[in-house]
Image (cartoon, grey):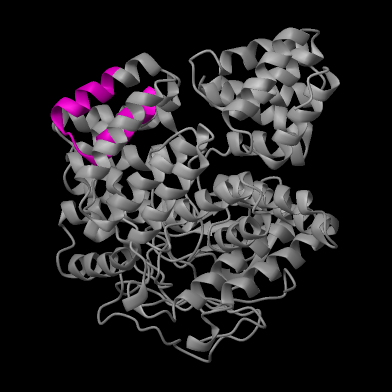
Amino acid sequence: MSPGTNESAPTDVGDDGLPASGGTTGAPAGPTPGAGEATRTGTGTGTETDAGTNADAGTNAGTGTETDAGTEASTGAGTETDAGTEASTGAGAGAGAGAGTATDAGTASDAGTGTGTDDGDSHAAHAGTAADGTDPADGDGGVRAVPAGVPSGAAGVADGRVVAVRRVAAAGRRWRAAQLTGCVVALAVALTAGGVVLGARDDRTAPVAAVPGTGVSPQLLASADLDAGIRSLQAHLRSQPRDFGSWATLGLAYVEQARTKGDPSRYPQAERALDRSLRLRPDNDPALAGRAALAAARHRFPEALKWADRALAENPYSERALSSRIDALVELGRYDEASEAADLADSRRPGVPVFTRYAYVHELRGDVKTARRVLEQALGTATSRGDVAYVATALGQLAWNQGEYGRARTYYDRALGADEAYLPALEGRARTQAATGENAKAIRGMEDVVSRSPLPQALTLLGELYEARGGKGDARRARDQYALVDAWTALARANGVNADLDTALAAADHGDRAAALTAARAEWSRRRTVHTADALAWALHVNGRDEEALPYARRATATGYRNAAFLQHRGTIERATGHPGQARSALSRALELNPGFSPSGARAARADLKALGEAR
C-alpha cells in the first residue's frame, strides 16, 4: 500500500448523497478494483453539482470529478468529504493538517467500523457496530477499496478485520519513518477494509445496537436497521425531495453512523442533510435538535447548546433537544445547570435517554447510589434490545469505576446477551478482564474492539496491555496503537471534530508531551470540566510543571466524582510538589477504589506508594 501511487475513479454523485434514479447496486460499474485501487459508486440523482471541478488544494489522483452538494471540501488532513460518498483520505490531495501533504490513496474511508467521538466525559453517544458494510451514502451498496490480501465475499468475513488490523500495524511501523501521513492512510484503508468484509455478512446475524439517546427510533438505529433505514429514506427523498422531516431524520442517522462506525467523514454529510431540512422549513425542531446532536458529537458544545435551545423554543418537549442540552452543559462543566436541565427533562420526557443522563450528572457529583438507582430503573423499563444493551453497559461502567468487577461483568454479560456485538460492552468486558488479571482474554477482546472501533481510549488501553505483557514484538505493537491514535485524531479534525482532549490524554503518556500540553490548554480554554482539569494537570506534570499542575489536579477531584485515574494523577503531582501525606492519601484511595483502573496507572501508583514507604 504505497501512498501516492493509487488511483480512484469516482462515479457521479448527486446532491446530498441520494442514489441516482434507479439506484446503484453493490456491483462495480467497471472492473473489480484490485489491490490499491478503489471504485466509489455514486448515489446521485444525475449530474454533478459542483460545476465539474474538484476544489482540492492539490491534484486529485482520481479520474473522475468529485461531487458535493455544491462544493468539494478539502479538509485539512488530506480528507475530502462529500455529501454522501466518502472521505478520500490520503497523502497528496491537499495540504494535511499537521500531516504533511497528502495524495489520494485511492480508498474511500467510509469506515464500516469504528467508534464514536465522545471523549469519555459524556454518556451522550451510545451505539454499537453496523453489521452491514454498505456505504450509507450509497444507499444500495457502494464499492470500497480492497487492499491486497484482504479476502472478499463470505469466505473473508471471519478474518477480514484481522487482516485490516495487521495492515494498520505494518503501516504504523512505517509511520515512524514517514510521520503521520502514512498512518492516516493506513487507518482509512483499515476502516475501509473492515467495511468491505462486513458487507458480506448475513443480515440475519447482524447485531442490534440502538442508540436511544438521539431521539431516532431504536428500530431505525439498531445496527442492522440503520443502513436499511438510510436507504429507505434516500429512496423516499428521491420522490419527495421537499420532505423536510425526512431530511432531518437522514441527517441524524448519518450522525449515528459516524459515531457507531468511528467515521468522522459522515459528519459533513449529516450537516448538509440537516441544513437542507432547515432550508425547506426554517426552525423545524427535529432539524434544530439534529444540529444540536451533530455539534455535540463534534465536541462543539457551545454550538450544541445554542441549537438545543433553538429547538426547545420550537418544541419544549423535544427529547433529543432536552438530552443534547444536558450533554452540552455537562461537557461545558456547568454542572449545576446540567442538574437543573436533567430535572426539567425528567419532568417533560422521562425515558431511557433522560434517565441515563440524569444518572451521569449524579455520578459526576459522587452520588453513585442515586446514579445506580436511576440506571436500574431505566434497565427495568427498557424493552428493546438496544436499550437493554445500552443501559446495562452504563451500569457495568458505573460498577467498574467503583472496582466492583463481579457486578460489572454481570452487567456487561447482560448487555452482550441483548446484543453480542455491542462494542461498549465488549470493551467494558475486556477492561474488566484486564483489571482481574485475565490479560490474555483482555488483549484478545481489545484487539477485536479496535479492529472495528479504533477510538483513542481503546487504542491506548490495548497498547498498554501489550506493554504490560512484554512479549516479543509487544513494544512494537504498542507503538503501533499509539501511532493510530494520532491518525484517528487527524481524521477527526479534518471532519470538524474537536479532538484536543483525545490528543492531550494520549500524548501525555505515549506521544509528544509538548503537543499534549498545547492541546490540554486549548481544551481548557473552551470548557472547564473535571476531565479537562485532569488532562491539563497531567499534561503540565509530564512537562515538569508540577506547581502549576496541582490546582488543576485538585479541581478535577473537587466534585466528588469517583475516578481512580484522577486520584492517581493528583497523588503523583502532590508527591512531586512536596505533599507526601496528601500524596499517600490520594494514591491509596485510587487503588482502593479501582485497583485495576489502568495497566500503567495502577503500576505507577504502587511505585509511588512504595517510594513513599506505603507499598501495597
Asked where in the image residue 189 lies, by quadrant, the reply is bottom right
Q: Residue at x 17, y 52 (%)?
A: 244
Query: Please, what is the dominant secondary structure of the magenta stretch?
Result: helix
Q: Is residue 20 above or below residue 171?
A: below
Please indicate whether residue 350 sits to the left or right of residue 359 in the image.
left
From which residue to which does the magenta span run?
340-362
Question: Is residue 316 visible from the viewing direction of this image?
Answer: no
- Residue 29 coordinates in the image, percent (x, y): 44, 88
Please indicate whether residue 297 sits to the left or right of residue 611 in the image.
left
Quarter occupied by the C terminus: top right
Q: Is residue 423 magenta?
A: no
- Residue 496 coordinates in the image, percent (x, y): 50, 44
Please indicate whether residue 273 sits to the left or right of residue 257 in the image.
left
Q: Residue at x 57, y 13 (%)?
A: 555
Q: Is residue 437 above or below residue 136?
A: above
Foreground: 139 or 158? 158
Q: Residue at x 83, y 18 (%)?
A: 613
Asked where in the image residue 221 lies, by quadrant, the reply is bottom left
- Residue 354 coordinates in the image, percent (x, y): 26, 34
Q: Residue at x 49, y 90 (%)?
A: 30
Quarter occupied by the N terminus: bottom right
Q: Is residue 260 above or below residue 146?
A: above
